[in-house]
Amino acid sequence: MTRLLCHVAAVIAIAVMSSALTPVAAQSGRGEIWATEQSGTSGRLLIYDAYQLHQQPESVIPQTLFLDADNDPATQTVGDLCRSVTGSVPTRAHVVEFNRTGSHAIVSFVATGHVAFLDAGTRAAVGCVDVGAQAHAATAAPDGSYVLVANQNGKLLQRIRTNYSANIFVLDDAATINLATCTTPNGFPCQDAVPAQAVLRPDTAPIYPAFDGSGRMVFVTLRGGGMFVVDGTATPMRIISEYDRNAVHANGLIGVESNGKMYINSGGGDAANPTEFDVYSFTLRDFPSSGFTAVNSPAARSVISRDSGNHDAHGMMVTREKYLWVADRFANTIDVIDTATDTLVRTFSLAGPLANDPTPDLLALHPLVNYAVVSLRGPCPLTGNAPGVNNAVGTAPGIGLISIDEAGLSGRLQSIAPVRGIDAGIASCAPAGAVGSNDRADVHGISVRSIPRP
């Protein structure tokens, strides 16, 4: 591992020195694009000035934050802080998100249970909480009072109390729901005792907690299928609605709110369920303000269902025109859904002259009107790739800039800001069946930080 870090560091050392430690957003005031790159131990954060990414994507140099412990008393990386607070170093930065004000970045580490907090303006590591087995994703409540963590292999939904002004972040153990052992308000086990004989939910590993606008309801997607809607403000948190694996298919991922509805997708990416594509909508006003609902109620509306062929739904976002875009990283396409009617209205491809296999992963709106950004996976993906299927293998790791055309009905991959992690010490790190490559760069998480003009 040390040799790998040295090789990667050598490739990007010039970029790091050029970006120094000055937040580039101060130059434009228009916002920043933050992305996680998963290779190495803790990985790295890449921070782009949004305007520069738009103007000169092929040559833009991001500010690069290495997240490993470096034992340098003059600086404190996320790894240093986590080691000092928790006794261990975080592994594989996976998702980066922001609190609503954009004052703090929240980074979850998928190979350990660490959730790190950074002052977004100074880039300083200011907090670290270890929730246990595996922090797949951590999202902030709209009011800024807490963060919910999907502890995937721990099968726990956990809450971290947050005070951003004082940089205080505390795991609230009393709030935790153990999704492996709990019982729903309807009297059913949250997870079936024998997965092979599952009737409701064979595997309740949580993947992503998606807040509705009120911050009370949280839609928690599950690895083995099904879903829970949870009151995140209760102590302990409580289940409001439960769905089985037939109502919401396996590998549920992200939730996005639009037009009074919550949209949830399910995808592929593991050996048991390598390829799949489903999108569901739930009308928020149908959920009760108190109490709980029957199983699979209020009913999910199936918007798209593609359970055969080369598909893997992953990232989603809503354009300013209220069209829902869904990235299919296996098919290299974006599906466009009209949120007023819940109908699929267009599918367009991102494959073309810039990349024959871009593998679009997660999406976000660019601060400039009529553009989106997308993380593009590399030839050696560390997460979400089904062995022998290679649904997450890409040819152009980096940040893609997509033009939003026809008022959100279509788009075009306009440019790619490349990210590289060449390891000269190996012949190839690509999975079996994929084209060989020694480029370990694996971009995954992406989020936009809006910054007001001074």
Image (cartoon, rainbow, N blue to C red):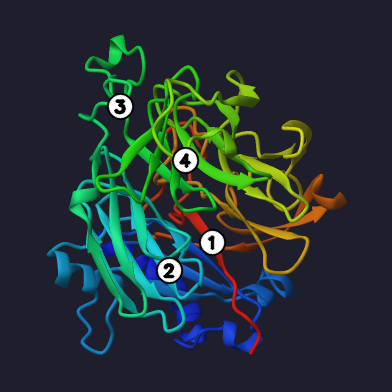
Q: Which residue is mark 4?
A: 289
Instruction: Give the camera-side residue of 92 and 206.
Output: 206
**Distance of mark 3 from mark 4, alpha carbons?**
17 Å
**Distance of mark 2 from mark 4, alpha carbons?**
31 Å
Q: What's the residue type where badge 3 is placed?
A: Thr
Asked if marks 2 and 4 touch (Cβ < 8 Å), the reply is: no
Left or right of 158 in this view: 393: right
Whichever of labels 1 and 4 marks the residue nearer the N terminus, that label is 4
Whichever of labels 3 and 4 marks the residue nearer the N terminus, that label is 3
Image quadrant where one finds the C terminus: bottom right
Secondary element at image label 1? strand
**Distance of mark 2 from mark 3, alpha carbons?**
33 Å
Q: Which residue is mark 1?
A: 447
Q: What's the residue type where badge 1 is placed?
A: Ser
**Distance of mark 1 from mark 3, alpha carbons?**
33 Å
Instruction: Give the camera-side residue of 114 and 8.
Output: 114
In the rendered view, would you say 18 is above or below 371?
below
Secondary element at image label 2? strand
Q: Between tags 1 and 4, which lies in front? A: 4
Asked if marks 2 and 1 touch (Cβ < 8 Å), the reply is: yes
**Distance of mark 1 from mark 4, alpha carbons?**
31 Å
Secondary element at image label 4? loop
In the rendered view, would you say 269 is above or below 140?
above
Whichever of labels 2 and 3 marks the residue nearer the N terminus, that label is 2
Q: Between tags 1 and 3, which lies in front? A: 3
Whichever of labels 2 and 4 marks the residue nearer the N terminus, that label is 2
Residue at x 74%, y 61% (from the top left corner): 371
Asked if marks 1 and 3 touch (Cβ < 8 Å), the reply is: no
Q: Which residue is mark 3?
A: 184
Q: Which residue is mark 2?
A: 105
Instruction: Give the camera-side residue of 139 and 223.
Output: 139
